[in-house]
Amino acid sequence: MSGTNQLFDPLRIQPTDPGQVSLADAWSANTKLLTDYLARQQQEAQDQGLWTGGQVWEGGHPTAAGVVNAAGQTAQGVMMGTTAPGDVAPGFTAFHGSPHDFDAFDTSKIGTGEGAQAYGHGLYFAGNEGVARSYRDTLSGNSPDAVHDAQGLLRDSGGDFDKASSMNTDMWKDPNSAPAQQVQRILDHWRTNGTDSLPPTAGHMYEVNIGADPAHFLDWDKPLSEQSQHVQDAVAQIGIKPATYAVRPVDNGFVVDYEGKTSRVFPTQDAAQNAAAQTAKMQGKDPTGAEMYRHTGDPAAVAQALHQAGIPGIRYLDQGSRAAANLTITPPTQTVSGKWMVKGDDYNSQGQHFDTQAEAQKYLAEQNAKATRNHVVFDANTIDILRKYGIAGLIAGGGAAAATGTQPQQ
């Protein structure tokens, strides 16, 4: 019986250790990360009308609005481009994009905004900065749907902005809703500036520290047998336990002692393990994180129960990473090409072929390294805001870039 449970799949080859990295390589890599980051910061501020353009050493400087913006946020105690005052709990860094300006996260606001809460009841954060930025931009007025609606209203009104605005008000059940306001904001910008540009992106970006161990989060995509030991112990407290079984050798092969019963004989240990894993899955004793969460009842109550059991939240692969996470390596003996193949679970995928196992491993490691996850946090007290994006970070960052001897790429 061929198994598909990755925990027991002998064809899934883990990436090798990356090895030692020289000090020179580390310095070069960190310098590039810094310069790339500063370039993004400059563009963010320029798009919002907070920066004139160009680097500090080229005469770039904050606009009047930028000075007000930086001063206001500094007064709030959030030094953009630096960490917030005080000690920060151990944990990991993540990002949050929002159309709103605030100084602390609040779980009482869950369900009152635009988020769908599709992956559990909590506060959402992205490991990939670009994912958070995209979310902010979508909710802050320049989403593709809002642009399309504004174009349609202007076309149907014959170019009459007053009529288009009136039609926009009539089109929505709640004219004060976020989607309605997004469309109106675009129409107002076009009225003043013409239709060749969009209004500057509003909203804010937040870099945060999540004071928890990533391994303690319930993984939305993985079965119970592949969750961390901490998660397995925690969900056992609320009655979710994996199937218990053990594979042992016999004279003519291998058998599985599965919850008090002994299986038939399998020719190999891998075949026995795969059969046991498949049986557990079919019996509902190896549910994924999503199945565990959805099976238990009201989302808010489930989040509370998991939190009380010691699980700080849920983690899941973002949309851009799901394909990479399903890649496996197939040896030459099982491929038509007679080469090592790295392929996802998409039936139509052709896969990538390599002459050696090392090349296949390297490719798989590179793809897995690109995978990023989003996190849903149950308790706002776990979150420390490190930074709001803005002009002060650019001013301080310009000096930091100059100190490295390089200039951010445009």
Image (cartoon, rainbow, N blue to C red):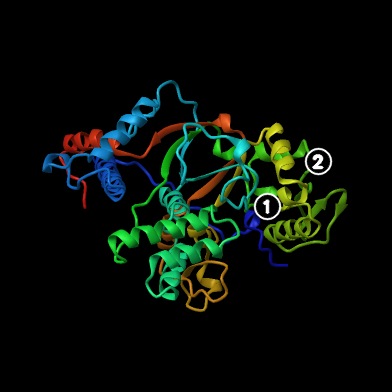
Q: Residue at x 39, y 65 (%)?
A: 161
- Specify whether 244 is left or right of 30: right
- Characterize the local packing of mark 1: few (<14), some (14-19) or many (20 or more) Cα atoms within 10 angstroms: some
Q: Nearer the viewer, residue 258 or 265?
A: 258
Picture residue at 55% right of the left edge, 39% below the top = 214
Q: Nearer the viewer, mark 1 or mark 2?
A: 1
Q: Eyeballing the image, is 238 above or below 201?
A: above
Neighbor class of circle 2 (other Cα within 10 Å; few <14, some 14-19, many 20+) is: few
The secondary structure type at the circle numbered 1 is helix
Q: Tell which residue pokes out farthest to the left in this image.
A: 58
Is residue 234 in view? no
Which amino acid is tagged 2? Gly
What is the x, y in percent for residue 253?
Answer: 75, 60
Residue at the image position 49 percent from the left and 26 percent from the top:
89
Q: Position of residue 298 (x, y in %)?
A: 75, 46
Residue at the far bottom: name it.
336
**Of residues 231 and 17, which is closer to you in this image?**
231
Task: Tell me if 360 is positioned left or right of 119 in this view.
Answer: left
Is residue 152 at least partly visible in the picture?
A: yes
Please name the amino acid that badge 1 sits on.
Answer: Ala
Q: Secondary structure at mark 2?
A: loop
Q: Residue furthest top?
A: 86
Name the quadrant of the N terminus: bottom right
Q: Position of residue 118 (x, y in %)?
A: 62, 53
Q: Is residue 397 left or right of residue 326?
A: left
Which one is earlier in the sequence, the residue at label 1 or at label 2? 2
Name the mark on residue 290. 1
Mark 2, residue position: 239
* Callout 1 touching callout 2 (CB < 8 Å): no
